[in-house]
């Protein structure tokens, strides 16, 4: 397909791990990104992974990349109420290196 | 504080009117972008500019135009607004094309 695919909603209990999945389209994408959008705000870069890596860990965040399946995931350990937001996966496509986003996954934290 | 400034913050516009959304960055980034965000559709790229003096079309360019006369400014113009252009518009920049984006706080535009 032509679109970056993400599930639209995810509910997780506080303290559990959240896993947000993404399927991207361009196998030559140099970087893959995760952005976070809190209510009423713009997007902020959360983390990224270079295409020659399989995994990247940054404190509570773990990014896994499966290039064969063009699958990217973001794991948030010990999910907190402050993690409630929309999470966007993004890839680089085309010869002009345009950055294209998925539709976003809304993470809802249950008490 | 370095960053991206968008103006106005919000606007209600009558259909058929012309409107320019302003975007200025002070980070000396080469690449700049305009996205629109709509419920259920995520962010879609409208136009982009990889360096001053050049522009390119994104996923949804129709009804919009841009210019990049200098490094800092990247205005987005709606020549004749239509209700389907009601959206939240985000300007973004990156040091060079393909690197991580810095976003402005957005302009909420309603076309009636």
Image (spheres, coloured by chain):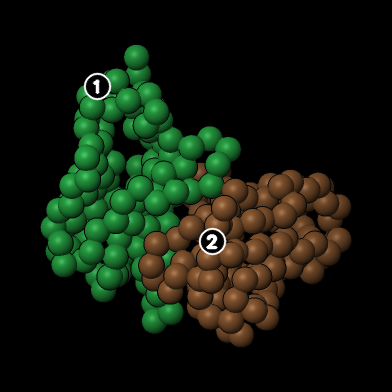
Chain colours: A green, B brown
Q: Position of residue B78 (x, y in %)?
A: 75, 65
Quick one: B41 or A74, which is closer to the camera? Answer: A74
Cα–Cα gap, marks 1 and 2: 33 Å
B57 displayed left or right of A82: right
User: In the image, is residue A44 above or below residue B69?
Assistant: above
Q: Which label belongs to residue B61?
A: none
Q: Seen from this angle, which residue lies furthest front?
A: B1
- The chain under label 1 reads A
B74 displayed left or right of A66: right
- CB under 8 Å between callouts 1 and 2? no
Asked which secondary structure carries label 2, the reply is: strand
Quick one: A1 or B21, which is closer to the camera? Answer: B21
Q: Residues within 10 Å of mark 1 (few under 14, many from 20)?
A: some
Residue at the spot of label 2: B92
Q: Seen from this angle, which residue lies furthest top?
A: A111
Where residue A58 sits, quadrant-wise, is top left
Q: Seen from this angle, which residue lies furthest bottom?
A: B53
- The chain under label 2 reads B
Where residue A19 sits, quadrant-wise, is top left
User: In the image, is residue A55 above or below residue A31?
Assistant: above
- Residue at the spot x=39%, y=81% of the render? A95
Q: Position of residue A9 (x, y in %)?
A: 38, 35
- Residue at the spot x=25%, y=44% of the render? A74
Q: Residues within 10 Å of mark 2 (few under 14, many from 20)?
A: many
Where residue A8 sits, quadrant-wise, is top left
Q: Is residue A74 visible?
A: yes
Q: Position of residue B5 (x, y in %)?
A: 64, 56
Q: Which label belongs to residue A15?
A: 1
A37 displayed left or right of B81: left
- Residue at the spot x=58%, y=70% of the render? B47
Asked which secondary structure carries label 1, the reply is: loop
Q: Position of residue B35 (x, y in %)?
A: 56, 59
């Amino acid at each position: 397909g032509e679109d970056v695919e993400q599930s639209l909603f995810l509910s997780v209990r506080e303290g559990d791990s959240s896993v947000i999945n993404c399927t991207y389209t361009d196998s030559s994408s140099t970087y893959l990104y995760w952005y976070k959008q809190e209510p009423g705000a713009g997007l902020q870069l959360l983390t990224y992974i270079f295409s020659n890596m399989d995994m990247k860990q940054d404190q509570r965040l773990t990014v896994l990349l499966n290039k064969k399946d063009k699958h990217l995931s973001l794991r948030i350990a010990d999910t907190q109420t402050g993690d409630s937001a929309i999470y966007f996966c993004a890839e680089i496509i085309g010869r002009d290196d345009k950055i294209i986003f998925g539709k976003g996954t809304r993470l809802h934290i249950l008490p | 504080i370095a960053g991206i400034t968008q103006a106005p913050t919000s606007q209600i516009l009558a259909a058929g009117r012309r409107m320019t959304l302003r975007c200025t960055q002070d980070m000396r980034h080469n690449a700049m972008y305009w996205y629109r965000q709509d419920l259920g559709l995520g962010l879609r790229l409208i136009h982009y500019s990889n360096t001053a003096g050049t522009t390119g079309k994104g996923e949804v360019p129709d009804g919009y135009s841009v210019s990049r006369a200098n490094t800092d400014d990247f205005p987005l113009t709606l020549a004749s607004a239509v209700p389907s252009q009601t959206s939240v518009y985000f300007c973004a920049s990156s040091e060079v094309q393909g690197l991580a984006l810095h976003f402005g706080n957005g302009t909420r535009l309603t076309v009636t």
